Image (cartoon, rainbow, N blue to C red):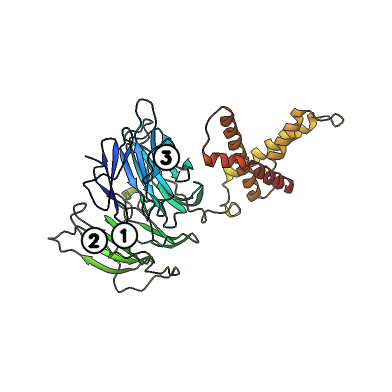
Amino acid sequence: MQNWCPSWSEDETVCARNVNNEVHFFENNNLNTIANKLHLQKINDFVLSPGPQPYKVAVYVPGSKGAPSFVRLYQYPNFDGPHAALANKSFFKADKVTMLWNKKATAVLVIASTDVDKTGASYYGEQTLHYIATNGESAVVQLPKNGPIYDVVWNSSSTEFCAVYGFMPAKATIFNLKCDPVFDFGTGPRNAAYYSPHGHILVLAGFGNLRGQMEVWDVKNYKLISKPVASDSTYFAWCPDGEHILTATCAPRLRVNNGFKIWHYTGSVLHKYDVPSNAELWQVSWQPFLDGIFPTKTISYQAVPSDVPNEEPKAATAYRPPALRNKPNTNSKLHEEEPPQNMKPQPGNDKPLSKTALKNQRKHEAKKAAKQEARSDKSPPDLAPTPAAQSSAQNTISQSTSGNPEVDKKIKNLKKKLKAIEQLKEQATAGKQLEKNQLEKIQKEKALLQELEDLELGI
């Protein structure tokens, strides 16, 4: 029923298919002779790498009887021997996986998902994201918001990837090859991400049961270019020139209002085609071109002129019962939306606090001052301070504020990082195997301590 489909390498010289605990490889389209076999007990799925030789293959074996599931990477045709695998990553909580190679075939992203979420947080099971590189490195990608993983895509540069995840409104974040977040796009109504062929533009979109809102981002400078809306779209594709976008409404997903639109990434509709009401549109696709034919152009933020009117329906106003119709609107939201990280308000530009908040803040500051005075009264001036007194003095320093909210925020963040490093060290001494990105965090401890000391001396 599943995973029966044969798979070819990009140059079509190797064909592979999954047969009873084995992946069979055929060469030069001679399907009568098996050229190589990869044998693993209970092998469930495999994915051939893109690009030229040497070919690589990622294989997935589901866990059973308390043993974890695992994904292994091999280089064709080196399958024999205990050290034949280039990399191995084992994990629990996986009924099925999706394996995504990057364009240069140097790493795989694995979305592992379960059919049932035992915590009861989601109807749709539970998902985790893992990173495995052909040099043997592997890590769990830590996603800051709980909830399903809707989409994960590699940039064509193979140096970063974008994940769309979390309960609605979903978060979108770009990660580097160390699985550290590079840029956070905040939250919004989105469930898909599409990099342009040149990798310099990213579209975050909400299709399916969402309204079709798109955000077009310049990912070199992290600037928002446009926010077009393509309602009822069932298909999205970038043109190989990296400038134009195709959205379509196709049957059988939707049998009414079938048609397609061609957009410029700046938000203008350049061409529109509506199918007659008695007909259906099944498929639309761009003419394929080889990589490198279209050069990368500089990004424009100005909408391109168009003769096609954009007939997107205006958002209907929310229903208001008669008793509230003549009263001012109250901006109550179901979800607190989070802006992109470069649009978040700076601490200095915060809204003025309400009277209650100001009162509470003053009380808090008075309590702090009283505590500090009590500590200073207790320690006699003649005696050398005891270790306990020293630690309380350190606490006082750590609690002191510089008067600069930006510096205080940095100090707080540094302390949080150092606390996390302490916990990782304790786990390591307890014999737990740490991931590569966790070991790298521990190595940064000295630099973080130095930075903290500098900031506190600056106070």
Of marks 3 and 2, the one in the foreground = 3
Across and down, in percent, residue 327 comes to: 39, 52
Q: Mark 2 sits on what residue?
A: 284
Q: Nearer the viewer, residue 192 or 39?
A: 39
| Sequence-first disc among 1 and 2 | 1
Q: Is residue 199 left or right of residue 320?
A: right
Assign the N terminus to one quadrant of the image.
top left
Give the structural element (helix, strand or loop) at label 2: loop
| Sequence-first disc among 1 and 3 | 3
Residue at (54% x, 39% y) in the render: 438
- Given the image, on which type of amino acid does mark 2 rest? Val
Displayed quadrant of residue 263: bottom left
Residue 206 in the image: above or below residue 197: above
Displayed quadrant of residue 166: top left
- Given the image, on which type of amino acid does mark 3 rest? Ala
- Residues at marks 3 and 2, CA–CA distance in whole angstroms: 43 Å
Asked if labels 2 and 1 touch by Cβ distance under 8 angstroms, the answer is yes
Q: Is residue 437 left or right of residue 405?
A: left
Can residue 330 be seen here? The reply is no
| Sequence-first disc among 3 and 2 | 3
Q: Mark 1 sits on what residue?
A: 237
Q: Which mark is residue 84?
A: 3
- Residues at marks 1 and 3, CA–CA distance in whole angstroms: 38 Å
